[in-house]
Amino acid sequence: MPRTGRVLLPHCPHHIVQRGHNRRAVFAGRRDYERYLETLEEFKRSFGVKVYAWCLMTNHVHLLLGPGEDVTGIGRLMKRLAGRQTRYFNHIHQNTGTLWESRYKSSPVDKDEYLLACVRYIELNPVRARIVAAPEDYLWSSCRHRMGVEPCSWLDDDPCYLALGASVQQRQVNYWQFLRAAIPHDEWKVIRTAVRRNQLTGAEAFVARAEEILGRRIGSRAPGRPGRPKSK
């Protein structure tokens, strides 16, 4: 079966998932996580890509990346990032062969309707996996920055998060409440299915706009809109 063509849109966030080869661990210790993030910071600057969220799990990673006009920045970043981490991991842990699956998953995200929902989906991964009770307690997630626990100078604040309040404190309170609200099943299903199938994360209008930009039909259309946090 031929591979599904990857959809890339300029100035649009993309939800990226990359798993370890045969779902094996890609992080074996603290320094592995740190090295990955150091490289991500370096390459985001090199390739002009914004990083809106990240969560590093034992055998896979979630990233929310935003290219500029040049959409090839994401592919170049992911290739260099995977290659450098593989060389590092194999050297430190006396491993051989590939570290990652051959192809990462990617889903353009409707920044008007699904961006903040996708950030929440990513940052709640450790909670769904029962690793921590509160997402900000997980050391290897952008949630710690968003909640003011551990600032990350190179993380980009997405416009939906900034719209949660006029001050840092107000945004943190509103996002904290948004995180702790139960994710509607339909929202969770849309985000999960879209990134697994390399499809768009968004409703009818977003898919129609993307098709107009690309000049071609794109996969199935996702239903509905996610819930929104209320600013106070």
Image (cartoon, rainbow, N blue to C red):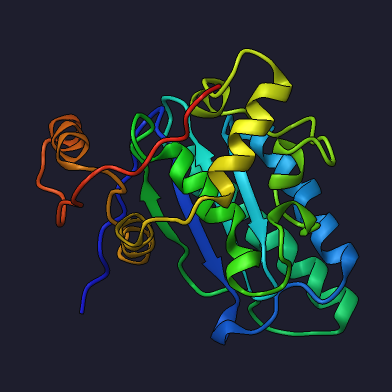
Quadrant assignment for the N terminus? bottom left
Q: Residue at x 61, y 53 (%)?
A: 123
Q: Quadrant of residue 128?
A: bottom right
Q: Residue at x 74, y 63 (%)?
A: 85
Q: Quadrant of residue 87?
A: bottom right
Whether residue 221 is situated above or below residue 32 in the rendered picture: above
Q: Residue at x 18, y 31 (%)?
A: 209
Q: Nearer the viewer, residue 9 or 228?
A: 228
Q: Nearer the viewer, residue 135 or 17?
A: 135
Q: Residue at x 55, y 29 (%)?
A: 161
Q: Quadrant of residue 130?
A: bottom right
Q: From the top left corner, tell me how far across and down residue 115 is, in percent.
A: 43, 38
Q: Nearer the viewer, residue 137 or 202?
A: 137
Whether residue 154 is situated above or below residue 124 in the rendered picture: above
Q: From the top left corner, tell me how far across and down residue 39 is, in percent.
A: 76, 48
* Relative horizontal placement of residue 21, taking residue 40 as reference (left or right): left
Q: From the top left corner, tell me how far across and down residue 138 is, in percent.
A: 76, 59
Quadrant assignment for the C terminus? top right
Q: From the top left corner, tell me how far across and down residue 189 is, in percent.
A: 33, 63
Name, please, the residue furthest toward the top: 166
> Could you tell me if residue 166 is visible in this image?
yes
